[in-house]
Amino acid sequence: MESFKVLVYCFLVFHFIPTSNTLETIVPGQSLKHNETLISTNETFEAGFFNFGDSNIQYFGIWYKDISPKTPVWIANRDVPLGNSSGVLNLTDKGTLVIVDSKEVMIWSSNTSTTAVKPSLQLLETGNLVVKDEIDPDKILWQSFDLPSDTLIPGMRIRSNLLTGNYTSLVSWRDTQDPATGLYSYHIDINGYPQVVIKKRNTLLFRVGSWNGNFLSGISSTTLYKSFNISFVITEKEVSYGYELLDKSIVSRYMLTPIGQVSRYMLSDQTKSWQLVFVGPSDQCDNYALCGANSNCDIDNSPICECFKGFIPKSQEKWSSQNWTDGCVRRVQLDCDNRDRFLKRMGMKLPDTSKSWFNKSMNLEECERFCIRNCSCTAYANLDVRDGGSGCLLWFNNILDVRKLPSGGQDLYIRVAASELDHSTGLNKKKLAGILVGCILFIAIMVILGVAIHRNQRRKLENPEQNQVFSLSNHTDNKKNEDIDIPIFELSTIAIATNNFSIDNKLGQGGFGPVYKGKLENGQDIAVKRLCNTSGQGPKEFINEVKLIANLQHRNLVKLLGCCVQNDEKLLIYEFMINRSLDYFIFDQTRKSLLNWTRRFQVICGIARGLLYLHEDSRLRIIHRDLKTSNILLDENMNPKISDFGLARTLWGDEAEGETRRIVGTYGYMSPEFATRGFFSVKSDVFSFGVIILETISGNKNREYCDYDDLDLLGYAWRLWSETTPLELIEESLRDSTVGAEAEILRCIQIGLLCVQEKADDRPDMSAAVLMLNGEKALPNPKEPAFYPRQCDSSSGTSNLHSNNDVSMTLLQGR
Ligand SMILES: *[C@@H]1O[C@H](CO)[C@@H](O)[C@H](O)[C@H]1NC(C)=O
Ligand SMILES: *[C@@H]1O[C@H](CO)[C@@H](O)[C@H](O)[C@H]1NC(C)=O
Ligand SMILES: *[C@@H]1O[C@H](CO)[C@@H](O)[C@H](O)[C@H]1NC(C)=O
Ligand SMILES: *[C@@H]1O[C@H](CO)[C@@H](O)[C@H](O)[C@H]1NC(C)=O
Ligand SMILES: *[C@@H]1O[C@H](CO)[C@@H](O)[C@H](O)[C@H]1NC(C)=O
Ligand SMILES: *[C@@H]1O[C@H](CO)[C@@H](O)[C@H](O)[C@H]1NC(C)=O
Ligand SMILES: *[C@@H]1O[C@H](CO)[C@@H](O)[C@H](O)[C@H]1NC(C)=O
Ligand SMILES: *[C@@H]1O[C@H](CO)[C@@H](O)[C@H](O)[C@H]1NC(C)=O
Ligand SMILES: *[C@@H]1O[C@H](CO)[C@@H](O)[C@H](O)[C@H]1NC(C)=O
Ligand SMILES: *[C@@H]1O[C@H](CO)[C@@H](O)[C@H](O)[C@H]1NC(C)=O
């Protein structure tokens, strides 16, 4: 399967002509020479001539003044670069901007149609280059915002004219070093209900989606969007899309890359470099109409395409061979009367709206009634999801390009014949009766059990107030963080699910307490983490904190299903991962072989993405502090999911100064500055990540490994690296599957070593590590890692401090 790579184009080397002269305004008669620049009032942006290393190819553009490497956000003459370094920008008497070369030949013009009396050119703080008339300063004669290049910055809008059909769009560069008009375009498609699309020439590749009141329907990362005021405005004449920053301290840009992906970057406060926070298309399901008509794409399923209920593959044979282009057809034709029903699918990216119909004032019931009256109407949804939903969006005939979103998403109602519903539920009345009786008996037993347990606990209870179950409505004071309703479970429910925390159900012992397997009444498997009560945190603060953590959602993070705070118990309820954890495989002699190199590489990349999300995405920067192979859980497809994230924070709060009296972590994974001084930062997680990479390649535990020189695994890897035989690190059972992938493994070893370098500052941050893993960033040479030569005894490293190497340690240090 084709895997999508996240390409980042912000590490380019730009050559800017050294300038000593900066201007603020240009009036006719004045000009901007190749060695002069125009700067905005508060010096955020700068405009002038630049090149990409070849001074015979010059462009006039706008870039961030203080961000290095320089990042152009707009280019005037992208298709007609200047030959040789002597371009001049002039403002004519009539207010037209022209660029002329050294022979006074005009190579670019702003073509302003209106004429001005007293024009002036100015670069605004927003990065907008404008020509104004001094006579009427409010009137803008021309602005660069009307002529987007490949980048959308705050305040800028792309527009589509509903009357003429003309539109402005982001157009990709041809190449990372060539800003000429490329193949891809990002604009608003005004057919049906307007939606934002990416096209390659005339082929639709990806729908970012239609507007749902909050954001575009194909976007799931809702946490990110809290920093933006995104607006999609539909008027009689035009549709436009743009964004503003709510938090002025953030710097963000949105661009269409030369390979046709939209990427949103934010400037990291710490590293002063661009961090990729969103990219689309991001996986296979984002391919336009990959699964054909009337089907759903779910990246977590295998195969990823499924027909909607009531539909079957048009050609079973092709469908089975994973050619989904023909899509699905109805099993039973619609009755076309009031007996047809609608099936609700939740968490969806809405179908292609280019042939849809919409009405802003109808509500959902009116929408359903309207749909059922027209036989070719096949699905409906709310137009606007805010305030419980309003408006009506209707689809006719086939619906295309629907996917399940990893988080967020909308409700979609799909029309099926009434018989389809009877078909599945009322098939066998005897069986049904049997199930019913079974259910009733089961519920009765549960109720009796529940009452018994509840009574039992009542008796034990000393402080009755603590027994209170906190529901969301109890504390709405912290409204901002409540985008996600986290279910609060009753202790009794969990006690039943885990057979009263029976030892048989114990999955293991984590750093923060034991973990139990359980099964909820509805049959769902869960993992329950029973937290040791070490914090002084009250139940209310605890729940608020858990809610913050539940807001973090990512494919590579374990999903938190709920929590429970009752009596002295604090429980976290997670989804259950069938394939346990990474250590269960890579350190086991027989199970080792189940994870070949391709899988291991996927695991490494997945961990990196999850960690990048924790470190950079949410405004709630999470440092894991206890990253290790046993905290990397594997789902049924061997996708890695980081667990226990945010726990340190939940239990002890976030010590912003980055120094903690409690050192929590696991020997072998702790960075030296953390183990010795309790100093933590994102770079301590990077260290642990490096250890995980090396362990995954070598199949050995860092702490238990002991070679003839008494080196730990890091020391051993470093020695092999210095002796230029790094590939000897590869585990024996892995060798077969690594043929042909040596370069990839070598890269991983080098990244592993870069991550475990002694000095935190030398280690890459996670965004750099992700780029390196994708092979899109050059790898520096690693320096010596932090490793510990020592006397090892034959059995198990130096672990006389503690009996079990895998258990997280909590040390209390006085300060
Ligand atoms: C800019 O370059 C021109 C020649 O192209 C030169 O005459 C002028 O002095 C330079 N100005 C500055 C400020 O360096
Ligand atoms: C551009 O400006 C320069 C200097 O002001 C002037 O010499 C030149 O003639 C102008 N060219 C055009 C095309 O206006
Ligand atoms: C420039 O900065 C000053 C001081 O921070 C601020 O008052 C002013 O509004 C800013 N001007 C613009 C155009 O942003
Ligand atoms: C630019 O410079 C190259 C060589 O440096 C020369 O061949 C070419 O004629 C020049 N072009 C112009 C327009 O001056
Ligand atoms: C200005 O007009 C000329 C001729 O009509 C055209 O070639 C050029 O592309 C236009 N420039 C812009 C920036 O639209
Ligand atoms: C729309 O585009 C056409 C050709 O691209 C152009 O002739 C026309 O002037 C444009 N209309 C407006 C209102 O910009
Ligand atoms: C968001 O932008 C719209 C229009 O651009 C404006 O009306 C609205 O007040 C803004 N909202 C916030 C919260 O700034
Ligand atoms: C899938 O089926 C379509 C139409 O039935 C056909 O055009 C296409 O070539 C097939 N794709 C592959 C990869 O076989
Ligand atoms: C939208 O629905 C409302 C209420 O049903 C109706 O009054 C209005 O005419 C509809 N608008 C259109 C354009 O159909
Ligand atoms: C059903 O809707 C379609 C698409 O809007 C329209 O062409 C057709 O006339 C409608 N049929 C009826 C019976 O209203």
Image (cartoon, rainbow, N blue to C red):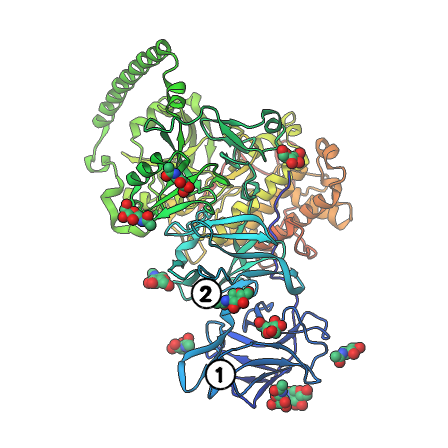
Vertical relation: 159 (above or below) 635: below
Marks 2 and 1 sit apart, C-alpha to C-alpha, by 28 Å
> Which residue is at a point 41% across and 63% down the rendered structure image?
245
Vertical relation: 511 (above or below) 83: above
- Residue 477 position, x and y percent, is 25, 51
- Residue 520 position, x and y percent, is 37, 25
- The reply to whether the residue tagged 1 has its Cβ within 8 angstroms of ligand 2 is no
Q: Is residue 200 visible?
A: yes
Q: Which residue is mark 1?
A: 115
269 with respect to 499 (left or right): right
Q: Residues within 10 Å of mark 2 (few under 14, many from 20)?
A: some
Quadrant of the frame with the N terminus: top right
**Relative depth, front residue between 712 and 477:** 477
**Relative depth, front residue between 60 and 569:** 60
Q: Which residue is mark 2?
A: 154
218 with respect to 449 (left or right): right
104 with respect to 470 (left or right): right
Vertical relation: 804 (above or below) 190: above
Secondary-structure class at tag 1: loop
Of the residues under marks 2 and 1, which one precedes in the sequence? 1
- Residue 181 position, x and y percent, is 63, 63
- Residue 151 position, x and y percent, is 54, 63
Tell me the kind of residue under disc 1.
Thr
> Which residue is at a point 65% across and 25% down the rendered structure image?
590
Tell me the kind of residue under disc 2.
Pro
> In the image, which disc is placed on residue 460?
none
Q: Is residue 529 visible?
A: no
> Which residue is at a point 29% across and 38% down the rendered structure image?
365
Q: Residues within 10 Å of mark 1 (few under 14, many from 20)?
A: some
Taking the view exactly as shown, the residue that stands out farthest to the bottom is: 29
- Which numbered disc, 2 or 1, marks the residue closer to the eye? 1
Quadrant of the frame with the C terminus: bottom left
